[in-house]
Image (tube, rainbow, N blue to C red):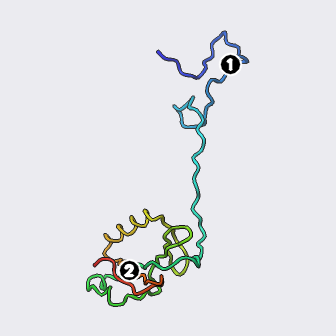
Amino acid sequence: MKRSPVTTLSKTTNPDQIDDPVPCSPGPPGKIGDPIAPPAAEKPRPERKEKIPETARPWGFVRHLSLEEALNGEASDDTAPSEPDTSLWWDVDRHRFLVASQDLVIDDLAPLQFVQFVRELRDVTNRILFKYERRQDGSTGRAHRVWS
């Protein structure tokens, strides 16, 4: 039988001679003698919303459709962004996609996260993704529906 690393007292043991072989961490019962683990470093998400940087360029927008619009297929009639649309920006300096609502950044995504975001949008029937065409001079052109 293997003994646990916790020191046990006997009648002949002097309490002044007891060494703690393994530092113990407070925890639930049954976890006595567990080594102390360093706390996991968690980065808190910033709670305040920031403005879209001036160096960011528009990439596209997401239109939230009503049920009637989704059923009638009227989403591609008006491709200009409107106030309730969620805008998508490419931050050139940080190489990240910004998701913004009412000119405030609500989320920033790495390119791989953005691909996952677009894939999830495809499965939602009441949201349509529009992407701006990029002109030769780098300016933003018309918006096109990404999928039908």
Q: Can you tell which quarter of the image residue 54 is in?
A: bottom right
Q: Can you tell which quarter of the image residue 13 is in?
A: top right
Q: Residue at x 27, y 79 (%)?
A: 148
Q: Can you tell which quarter of the image residue 38 is in?
A: top right
**What is the three-letter code of the residue carrying label 1?**
Ile
Comparing 18 with 117, the one in front is: 117
In three-dimensional space, the C-alpha distance between marks 1 and 2, rounded to whole angstroms, equals 71 Å
The residue lying furthest to the top in this view is 12
Label 2 SS: strand
Crowding around mark 2 (Cα neighbors within 10 Å: few <14, some 14 to 19, many 20+) is: many
Query: Looking at the image, is mark 1 or mark 2 nearer the viewer?
Result: 2
Q: Which residue is mark 1?
A: 18
Comparing 15 with 67, the one in front is: 67
Residue 70, how many percent across, how many down? 30, 82
Q: Which residue is mark 2?
A: 130
**What is the three-letter code of the residue carrying label 2?**
Phe
Comparing 11 with 79, the one in front is: 79
Q: Residue at x 44, y 87 (%)?
A: 82
Relative to 65, 27 lies left or right: right
Label 1 SS: loop
Crowding around mark 1 (Cα neighbors within 10 Å: few <14, some 14 to 19, many 20+) is: few
The residue lying furthest to the right in this view is 16
Q: Residue at x 56, y 70 (%)?
A: 93
The residue lying furthest to the front in this view is 136
